[in-house]
Amino acid sequence: MSYEKYQLKNKANIILVPLKDTKSVTVLVMYPVGSRYEPEKLAGVSHYIEHLMFKGTKKRPNTLVLTREIDRLGAEYNAFTGKEYTGYFIKVDAEYTETAVDILSDMLFNSKFDPKEMEREKGPIVEEIRMYKDNPIMNIENIYEDLMFAGCPLGRDIAGSEKYVLNYKQDEVLAYRKKHYQPQNMNVVVSGNINDKTKKVIEHYFGSETNKGKVSKDFKEYKFGSEKINVQKKDTDQVQLMLGFPGFKYGDKRNPISGVMNTIFGGSMSSRLFIQIRERRGLAYMVRSGAESYRDTGYQFVRIGLEAKNINKAIAVVKAEMEKLIKFGPTIRELADAKTHIRGGLTLSLEDSSTQASFYASQALFADKIKTPEEKLKEIEKVTKDQVQALAKQVYNWKKIRVAIIGNVEKQEIKF
């Protein structure tokens, strides 16, 4: 599958990903800015700005006019903020491509930032923060990263805190936006049913804006927190447990090996953790392992939802399974099955124009060189049994473990 990458005169980066057998088009715009780029008193401001983009432009004066125009197309649209990125997308029937590009560029270049709307939107953001805090499945990752990266912006909640959000000043918010939201910092990915007209449409709408000064790309480097365990006491029927170890940054050569290792360890219903924790012992309904990568660091994790009395049993099983993988490595069959599992999963997901757009956009932001799905799969194919075993030995170092828990438990009861 081929793609085309080029720059407009205003230095906006464009990636076109044509897909033959689809009638949809996804337009995704990503900026390399997120919560780790924020000064502390503006914690959560990247996410706040993302919300404000839907509040009306000069051409589409309020939320209702803006969203009604997208809704009448039957489109899927949304925005999202991470620790290192903010994205906006519209997925439409291909014949409405120009409308989607028009609306998205209008939001990003011409949003009004009306003071009343800015004040009003603080309420929904505070409620969103509370929603996450009330939902342990959604919040366990925040608790874990707060432990792993305690004391640096990478450990902070993406949405900030109620205190910070309620104290945002309009001029500070707009100054922050100006520092990051410029054409030269944009990555526009259009995937799906692309035709000859698409380039002209992109040029017309995204090429019209000029840059207003230098773009800030500064962020504070990561550091690991010194604590090993973080328990948030909450009266829940099920405990959420997340444990993990330092891992690898985006683009690290070990990431394909990590992908294979996690597939074998806890990435499917036939994985080692699923069989041992759920099928053999009945300790949990949900158990999985995985990895997260950032610009300069990352981590490997295991997540389990279970009853409080079973926490120590489950941790002991996880440790025993890690030790087995370190001592014996994977079997030849596990290795082969993991590779076909990854290939099949990627193939199925990439039938969708929006997944294609995300696949290329994340690389545009973080990779030195964009790789096609096939190039990524070739790296997976090359992974050997010895490499997985060596990586398990390197990653699963019990001295470096971090354990985060939400539930009705006491810290001193947890044994690891």
Image: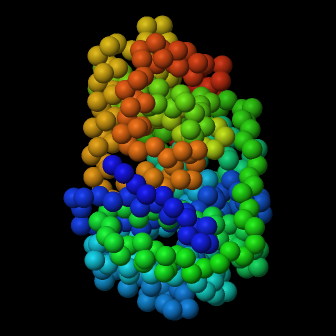
| 215 vs 65: above or below | above
Q: State the residue at coordinates (35%, 76%).
A: 197
Q: State the residue at coordinates (37%, 66%).
A: 26
**Residue 22, image x, y percentages:** 24, 62
Q: Is residue 40 visible?
A: yes
Q: Quadrant of residue 405?
A: top right
- Horizontal side of 220 relative to 358 (left or right) equals right
Q: Is residue 277 visible?
A: no
70 or 138, nearer to the observer: 70
Q: How many marks?
A: 0
Q: Residue furthest top?
A: 327
* Colour setup of the view: rainbow
The quadrant of the picture occupied by the C terminus is top right
57 or 162, nearer to the observer: 57
Q: State the residue at coordinates (46%, 74%).
A: 202
**Residue 415, image x, y percentages:** 58, 21
| 235 vs 108: above or below | above
**Residue 244, image x, y percentages:** 56, 30
Q: Quadrant of residue 398?
A: top right
**Residue 218, image x, y percentages:** 75, 55
Q: Residue furthest left?
A: 21
